[in-house]
Image (tube, rainbow, N blue to C red):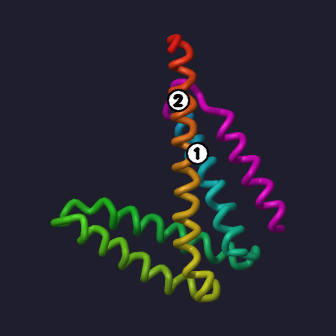
Amino acid sequence: MKPIITFIALLLFINLAQSQPQRPDRDARVSELKKIQAMELAFITKELNLNPNEAQKFWPIFNQYRNDLKQASQGKSYQDNLERQQKMLDVRKKYRDDFTKVVSPDRANKVFGAEDEFKSLVRKEFQKRQSEKKQIESRKKGF
């Protein structure tokens, strides 16, 4: 199962890397976002070594966690950045307990590390693409 998920994630990642439109419209951005979400699902499933039964229970909780985290991060009434960060930490602590109802406590703690690692991979890929795009543009201008 693990090799299949890894292979699918790799294919999605390669496809995403090769299919970068010059001027993405809204539909293209939504499509790219869905690809990234699918890659994240595969990545976290692999990192946590979720079996199908665990995955079926885990992903609805994770999706709710994501919604709650987004709401906490976008609060307008925060007096400062530390207050916003504390709210986000509170959400993570709550969901760590919820994740332990599906997976072991060690694996529940790995959720946040896997999430951060995936974000880092996406950020690096984005930066790489931006750099390549600038190089291509500068070559076209003759610099």
The magenta region covers 1-26
The earlier-in-sequence mark between 2 and 1 is 2
Is 1 above or below relative to 128? below
Amino acid on which the number 1 mark rests in the picture: Glu
Element at label 2: loop
Query: Residue 125 shows which numbered tag?
Result: 1
Q: From the viewer's perspective, is 34 left or right of 45?
A: left
Q: From the viewer's perspective, is 110 left or right of 85?
A: right
Residue at 53 percent across and 38 percent down: it is 29
Element at label 1: helix
Q: Of helix, strand and loop, which mostly describes the magenta segment?
A: helix
Residue at 55 percent across and 13 percent down: it is 140
Residue 135 sits in quarter: top right
The residue where tag 2 is placed is 24
Compare residues 65 and 84 and report the one nearer the observer. 84
Query: Residue 101 shows which numbered tag?
Result: none
